[in-house]
Image (cartoon, rainbow, N blue to C red):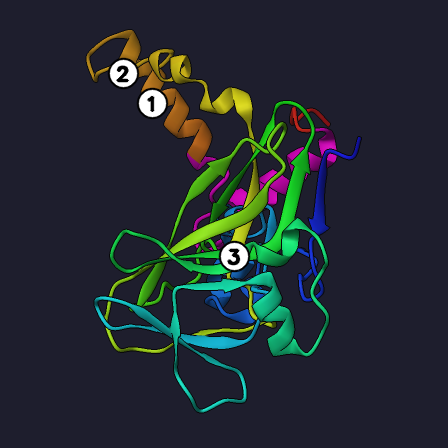
Amino acid sequence: MTTFSFHGCFSGAIEPTPADPALEGSPPFRAVTHCEPFRAAAGHGWYTRPPLDCSLKWDGASFTYRPSGSSEWLPLQHLSVADVCRLRGVSPPQDITEHLPVLSALPEPGVLQIWTGLLARTAPGWHLLVRGIPNRPGSLVHEVLEGVVESDWWHGPLIANLRFRRTDEEVRLSRHLPLLAVQPVRAEALRSGLRRETAFHPYGPGEPASAVAEFLTDAMSVRREGAPGGYRAEVARRRRAGDDGQE
């Protein structure tokens, strides 16, 4: 099978797009041009978008929403696939999907669950981390709660939870703006025993200090005085050489 596959579950679900190291033009020039760790994190995985255009508010007790093109705020407890399809003027699917929630207020105060309209399947040993967009400035009004889905065996709705931080402030969802990042994670990396396979070497004289000095010397050798981007250039060189750094 394909290592990663996404399936749209109703009309309006948007195909994920590869994550952009340049965050679609929003980050500082220096970060995009010279900082490989920034670029690698920002460009890891895919962007997903909401399947509808609307605005959301939380008043401290309940949610309301305003569909795109409307001036009326409506109570929001549960907005189903059928509701979203009607808002978009298309026919809903005549199956189990019709009644599944796209937006759903959870029992926890200020938490709203959103479904992208997608389900995901991954090859054995691969899971998916669902999170906000890495390195994009966060909203003061809401945040995306992160979660890992074991998508190599569970092929349900690809969802996320939004936690609202402020009341009576508008949050806009747009089908044209990325809302979530979906990033592949090896299942092995989540194994609980892996955390016990960690070593810490405190500073001390002799061999430990010598090793630290050697590590730092090697690391700093790729950074060029007065010329940013040395680490990025070294990463590119090693990739061209086949990851092991041997030309």
Give residue 125's position: percent from left, percent from top: 62, 23
Q: What residue did someone put label 1 on?
A: 213
The kind of residue on which mark 1 rests is: Ala
Magenta span has 137? no
Give residue 105's position: percent from left, percent from top: 37, 59
Query: Whole-Å distance between the Cαs marked 2 and 3?
Result: 57 Å
* Picture disc at residue 56: none
Instruction: Mark 2 vs mark 3: give the one in front.
Output: 3
At a point 45% along the width and 54% down the height, the residue shown is 132
Query: Whole-Å distance between the Cαs marked 1 and 3?
Result: 56 Å
* Picture disc at residue 209: 2
The quadrant in which residue 20 appears is bottom right
Q: Is residue 217 visible?
A: yes
Query: Which of the two discs, 1 and 3, labels the residue nearer the N terminus?
Result: 3
- View extreme (bottom): residue: 71
Query: Which of the image's four quarters has the C terminus?
Result: top right
